[in-house]
Amino acid sequence: MALSYHCPKCDALLNPNERVVLIASYNNQKGIVLMSSQLGDYQVICDKGFCHEVAAGDTIDFICPVCHGSLTAKNHEHFAELKIVNSEKENHAPCLLRFSRVSEEHATFLYDGDSVKEFGEEAGGFHDEMTIEGDWGW
Ligand SMILES: [Zn+2]
């Protein structure tokens, strides 16, 4: 499945190849992080100098590298959000992706307009909050 990830604010493509490029910010430090474009894959490549500052459980600010807008979800500040388009399907409606901003917390929700899919071993803990029908932030 070829997924393209876009900034919900400026619509810039954020995965020009396999990896999704984001700016992460924590404690006035910023670094580039490369996230996997495969849903449920939490391997991240990041600037070692920046990663060194971040411990498991820290909440990261994710920023679009193109417009520098914050990717924090408005109604769910625990999460950052991105727009996803399945480029193999014609006329595919964009989906909304929300992933936890907390370092090493694996919780991701994909809203495709009809359903919500969960990824990551910690997603279950947010299930009730994140899958309420009609509250998908569209
Ligand atoms: Zn942007």
Image (cartoon, rainbow, N blue to C red):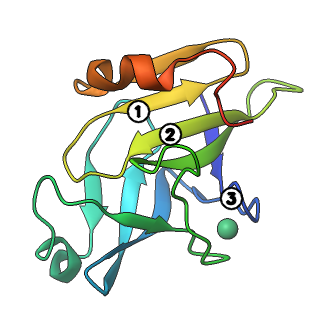
Vertical order, 7 against 70 (above or below): above
Q: CA distance from mark 3 to mark 2?
A: 17 Å
Q: CA distance from mark 1 to mark 3?
A: 20 Å
Residue 82 point in image, percent of width and height: 59, 48
Other-residue count near label 2 (Cα within 10 Å), few / some / many at <14 / 14–19 / ≥20: many
- The reply to whether dot 1 and dot 2 touch (C-beta < 8 Å) is yes
Instruction: Tell me which residue sits at (44%, 35%) in the image.
Output: 38
Hey, which quadrant is residue 107 in on the image?
top left
Point out the tag, 1 or 2, that comes first from the N-terminus: 2
Hey, which quadrant is residue 7 in on the image?
bottom right
Instruction: Tell me which residue sits at (50%, 17%) in the image.
Output: 117
Vertical order, 22 against 132 (above or below): below
Instruction: Tell me which residue sits at (44%, 64%) in the image.
Output: 62
| Residue at image mark 3 | 13
Residue 26 point in image, percent of width and height: 28, 75
For numbered disc 1, what is the local secondary structure? Answer: strand
Amino acid under label 1?
Answer: Thr
For numbered disc 2, what is the local secondary structure? Answer: strand
Residue 37 point in image, percent of width and height: 47, 43
- The reply to whether dot 3 and dot 2 touch (C-beta < 8 Å) is no
